[in-house]
Amino acid sequence: MGAPLSPRQLMCLQLLVDGCTSKEIARRLGLSPHTANQHIRELYRRLGVNKNSQAVAVALKHNLV
């Protein structure tokens, strides 16, 4: 795992674990879809993954959420 996650990235990660899409994450956090996708891309980079299911697996394995 890379650098520590920001509070916003942790919120995005929790929503991914809850099964939300990037559009749902944007709506729930009051962000544009583009901004939500930027947070998710950076989250993937920091976790060393490239898709939602991998991010969820890392989150659960490392008790991030």
Image: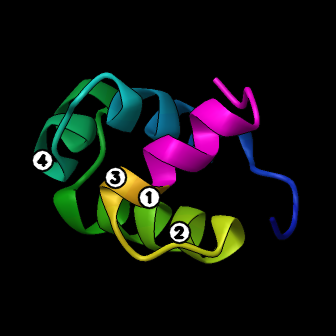
| Up-down relation of residue 32 to residue 11 (above or below) | below
Q: Given this view, does label 4 or label 3 mark the residue nearer the observer?
A: 3
SS at badge 2? helix
Q: Name the residue type under label 3.
A: Ser
Quarter of the image with the N terminus is bottom right
Question: Looking at the image, is mark 1 or mark 4 earlier in the sequence?
Answer: 4
Name which residue lies at 34% across and 52% down.
Answer: 53
- Which residue, given by chain and number where applicable, does mark 2 sit on? 44
Cα distance in 3D space between marks 2 and 1: 9 Å
Dot 2 amino acid type:
Tyr
Name the disc covering residue 53, or none.
3
Residue type of the residue flagged with mark 4:
Lys
Coloring applied to the structure: rainbow
Q: Earlier in the sequence, mark 3 or mark 2?
A: 2
Q: Is residue 57 magenta?
A: yes
In this view of the protein, which residue sits in the foreground, 62 or 2? Answer: 62
Q: Are marks 3 and 2 in contact (CB under 8 Å)?
A: no
Spatial distance from mark 3 to mark 2, Cα to Cα?
A: 11 Å
Which range is magenta? 55-65
User: Are circles 2 and 1 on residues that touch, CB within 8 Å?
Assistant: yes
Q: Three-letter amino acid code at disc 1? A: Gln
